[in-house]
Amino acid sequence: MNSFLALLMRDMRLAYRQGSALTMTLSFFVIAVTLFPLGVGPELDVLARIGPGVLWVGALLACLLTLDRIFQADYEDGTLEQLLMGPLPIEFIVLAKIMAHWITSVLPLIIVSPILAISLNLHSDGIWAMVISLLIGTPVLSLIGAVGGALTVAMRRGGVLLSLLVLPLYIPVLIFGVASVEAAVALLPMGPHLMLLGGLSLGALVVCPFAAAAALRLAVE
Amino acid sequence: MNSFLALLMRDMRLAYRQGSALTMTLSFFVIAVTLFPLGVGPELDVLARIGPGVLWVGALLACLLTLDRIFQADYEDGTLEQLLMGPLPIEFIVLAKIMAHWITSVLPLIIVSPILAISLNLHSDGIWAMVISLLIGTPVLSLIGAVGGALTVAMRRGGVLLSLLVLPLYIPVLIFGVASVEAAVALLPMGPHLMLLGGLSLGALVVCPFAAAAALRLAVE
Amino acid sequence: MAIDLHKYANPTRFLRIANAIFPWSIVVSVGLLVAGLYLGLFVAPPDYQQGETVRIMFVHVPAAWMAMSVYSMMAVSSAAGLIWKHPVADLSAKAAAPIGACFTFLALVTGSLWGQPMWGAYWVWDARLTSMLILLFLYLGYMAVWESFEDQSKAAKAAAILVLIGAINIPIIKFSVDWWNTLHQPASVATMEGPKIHGSILTPLLIMGLAYTSLFVTIFIIRVRAEILGRRLRMLRVNQLQE
Amino acid sequence: MSLHVQSLTCIRQDRLIFKSVELSLSSGEILWVKGRNGAGKSSLLRILAGLLKPASGIVSWDGTDVEQEPEQYQQNLRYVGHQDALKTAYTARENLNFWSQYTGTNNVAAALEAFQLQTIADHPVRILSAGQKKRSNLARLIACPAPLWILDEPVSSLDTDYIDLFKNLLETHVKAGGMALLATHQDLGLQSARHLDLNDIWQVAG
Amino acid sequence: MSLHVQSLTCIRQDRLIFKSVELSLSSGEILWVKGRNGAGKSSLLRILAGLLKPASGIVSWDGTDVEQEPEQYQQNLRYVGHQDALKTAYTARENLNFWSQYTGTNNVAAALEAFQLQTIADHPVRILSAGQKKRSNLARLIACPAPLWILDEPVSSLDTDYIDLFKNLLETHVKAGGMALLATHQDLGLQSARHLDLNDIWQVAG
Ligand code: HEM
Ligand SMILES: Nc1ncnc2c1ncn2[C@@H]1O[C@H](COP(=O)(O)OP(=O)(O)OP(=O)(O)O)[C@@H](O)[C@H]1O
Ligand SMILES: Nc1ncnc2c1ncn2[C@@H]1O[C@H](COP(=O)(O)OP(=O)(O)OP(=O)(O)O)[C@@H](O)[C@H]1O
Ligand SMILES: [Mg+2]
Ligand SMILES: [Mg+2]
């Protein structure tokens, strides 16, 4: 357990040092979301209509951009193989790194999402739904992303391949996530959608660490 | 001139080997653009309304995701410093790399954009406008991106900072790009917008290689 | 043997002038701020359309002016730093950035507070507002670059490159209201034809503008002095090693 | 404690690197793995560190096959490879602190002292010289003590004084009951070391 | 052709690394830069390769300050640093081909032969052993000939036979009118080499 915490803390502190401090992740998210109103035009009704989608897609992209951080650096400087030789089972190594990724790269987005939601003219019922659906759904993004990251870690600059592997798997999350916000805006029950999201999260939590661990073993050979 | 060609060809072949072959860049773009209909729902009129914006934003993000490829790998394995010691002025090194980036990562997107435009229900006048505006505008993305890439190359995993630096500067391109497509759809003259885009491209072509070269000199120290 | 530490050159003259100005600039900022706020909030007439909300203007407009002029000043001094390697130039750009970011933030916040009664929304994605938001990000990016390099002389160059490229945003902000049809109202003070608003509003506005400027000068001097002292300390350390 | 290797064969991408390697190592012993460039030293060491799967053969620790109980084995070994395994944004001390927390050991101060890193322990690793980096990496051996050291070119980019220092540490380690397997091209002049020449194995085997 | 260095001082991040270094090198000479880990060998070599700006001092090539005519100088030098400068997705041959096209030289086949790389020339560099990578990197010296070689630990991870081979190549190079500056910890036994000890400079200066 101590090893797990040590790894988690190290990853979080590294992310902070390497300048993806809160402010920066935030700025990325804000800028990414800003692109859409600029692209599609400022009409408030259109924005409100596409708001939930834009926020979810923004979260998804921010996640995607930071995915390679999960394993790439550790692989390249030889830290990964040292970690694998340590006392912590690989599945837990993966889990610690996924948690660190979610906390440093995704959680900050969720925290600012209400402000962005307001700027996109989202209905106030939608805002809470947004935050809750992000909280429940985004862990899947980090979990699946870790599998993709582990699979591509040995290929130098696997970035594009990574997004190719990962994005299709993100689509269900996106669909249910947006659906739950839209349900809330339409004053319909959002429970079922959230249940589905939660189910995805749990399923990914069970499957992904093992898949990523297997992929990592291949990578260090 | 031979050195320039050698570098350009090497970068293009490397991009190809490292698996960002045509098909892959394309798939990324296709998936990214597909996310939006999924996110905002399938109504055709909404889609047609946001189509140009979505395509432009997609191109912009694809560009962003591949930016670190311009200098990062060469920096990390020591190739960059060897290149700087070679006969080619740094400005031309930068230019060769920018061209390679544009050709391998952006041009394929432009080639498929008509198909995606159709799938987004874009008006047929808009499709040509789309292609032309992308052709004129996207070089700016690679050019500015190279400056950002050069500034952040010495910071390990400067990814997030890179997008923070670069995205704000992309915004004018996005605005004029989308405006020209929307003008075409509305059967208004798109000349002025294209002129502006062209002006941005020329301006960036003049300024960015020098800026990136200066930044690179700092990086190898 | 003394090393030619050009970049560490001792900016004595700057310090002398700054020290002379400093007490005055404190007095002037406080005085103007009090006068401007009094005139703006109590003396100036309410607008026939906007009512009392118009008073936000006296905070908002000068802040927006400052946001843009501080950035322009940073661009100029960064260029000077790159071209003439003037020792104080990089420092002053670095020192000015957070102040400029604060003014930008102030303009954004007051603007959106004003937007709620005026346009019915805190935020609209109009060209002026967006380009102003970009300005904030440029400031943040600039400061992040300074943070990201340990070597200060490298950081100075990298940040200078960034600030110069970002300068393209300033004319975009300025002319956004003319180039696109925006919700935001076009310029009425700093126009080619001269001010187009009534003196009872113009006077407090200009006073507030001056107040902000001298406030900027005050904070700026404090920050530059701190920077110079820090740099001197490092220079001392290097020279000590040499002995 | 002892390490036994029986008829180990290594195939990488359809190329036979070595076959029928036998070796054994017990407390107090040093085994110097020699061989020309490309002979397969690093491959052998990676197999023994559990990072590479052999095509065939058995590695056993204290009599039990390490494939069956990898954790038990891995707790007892420290591997230093070609790569630095240092986070360049961290200082040497922070790096060692992490590794000792991670492996549940606690010997960082002694490690810094052993490799004379005290003066540079608080610089970020990024700005260290090649030899300083190498020492920060080697310091892991002391910070996280374990009986079996597997060292791939441990002295490359160390200066002669530090090579001596390292040699002393190595000898102290095996005298205290540890054991070490090292691949170097430079002769460290370790009197007690046994030799394993991968070139010979090739001659015999193939 | 000759290289002259006058009162060179190097400061990195406010730390003085060395000062008042003087050296000169002309055709047919080898200069062995010695010094303990962290003495500043790599920093000196990087300054001479034009990759690092000195705090003060003059480097001149054939009498002209290299800051004034960097292109002229850089055409005449090859630098081999700690990093490999090899694209791991390419084979050694492809790497060398690129560098020779880039520098406008044409000697790849000879380079592969000189470093006995023929058999592995068509494997991707990714799967080469440490010594094989190093040789592929060094081969650039032959593939892209230039009079001044600046070599930072050129023999690390080479086996003894290849060290000899490299030594011969080095001697051939200087006999043919070339010159070389090298920093190594290992004594290559180069009779003709002059020495520059960075530790001494410190003692004298400080
Ligand atoms: C967050 C929202 C806002 C931002 C970012 C913003 C930004 C700016 C900027 C950059 C300027 C300086 C223009 C120049 O010097 O040419 C300005 C001036 C001004 N703004 Fe805003 N603004 C915002 C909201 C508003 C609102 C809601 C109003 C009221 C309707 C308003 C009224 C004005 C006025 C009257 C001026 C002075 C124009 C002149 O006389 O030159 N602004 N604003
Ligand atoms: N990942 C790999 N895939 C396939 N072959 C490999 C791989 N790594 C190394 N090889 C090959 O295996 C052989 C042995 O490599 P190894 O790294 O074990 O040699 P070594 O004895 O350590 O050499 P050196 O002294 O150069 O470090 C080499 O011929 C090399 O080309
Ligand atoms: N990028 C850098 N920034 C600041 N200081 C540095 C940097 N690189 C090296 N140094 C410091 O400069 C000193 C000299 O480093 P250098 O790499 O030149 O030593 P070296 O003689 O090559 O040592 P080695 O034998 O270990 O390779 C070291 O103390 C090191 O910490
Ligand atoms: Mg090896
Ligand atoms: Mg060195």
Image: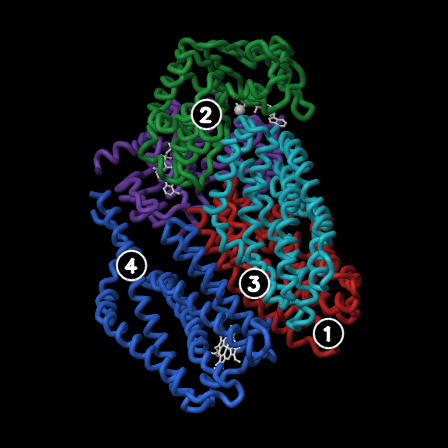
Chain colours: A cyan, B red, C blue, D green, E purple
- Marking on residue D204: none
Mark 1–mark 4 Cα distance, whole angstroms, equals: 55 Å
In the rendered structure, the residue with mark 2 lies on which chain? E
Foreground: disc 2 or disc 4 = 4
Amino acid type for the residue under numbered disc 4 = Ala
Answer whether labels 3 and 4 touch (C-beta < 8 Å). no
Find out whether the residues at labels 2 and 1 contact each other: C-beta distance under 8 Å.
no
Q: Are marks 2 and 3 on the same chain?
A: no
The quarter holding residue A158 reads top right
Residue underneath mark 3: A115
Label 3 vs label 4: CA separation?
Answer: 35 Å
> Horizontal and vertical percent for residue D19?
64, 14
Task: Choose mark 3 or mark 4, whichever is in front.
Answer: 3
Q: Which residue is located at x 36 percent, y 41 percent?
A: E2
What's the residue at 58%, 22% (across, down)? D50
The label on residue C226 is 4
Question: Please, what is the three-letter code of the amino acid marked with disc 1?
Answer: Ala
- Front in this rendered view, residue E196 or C224: C224
Q: CA distance from mark 2 to mark 4?
A: 58 Å
* Mark 2 neighbour density, 10 Å: few (under 14) some (14–19) many (20 or more): few
Quadrant hosting residue B181: bottom right
Q: Which residue is mark 1?
A: B184
Q: Position of residue E30 (x, y in %)?
A: 37, 32
Structural crowding at the residue carrying mark 3, measured as other residues with C-alpha within 10 Å and reported as few (<14), some (14–19) or many (≥20): some
Mark 1 vs mark 4: give the one in front: 4
Judged left or right of residue C191, residue A211 is right
**How many C-alpha atoms fall within 10 Å of the one at disc 1: few (<14), some, or many (≥20)?**
many
Q: Where ligand 2 lies, by quadrant?
A: top right
Please name the residue that numbered disc 2 is placed on.
E168
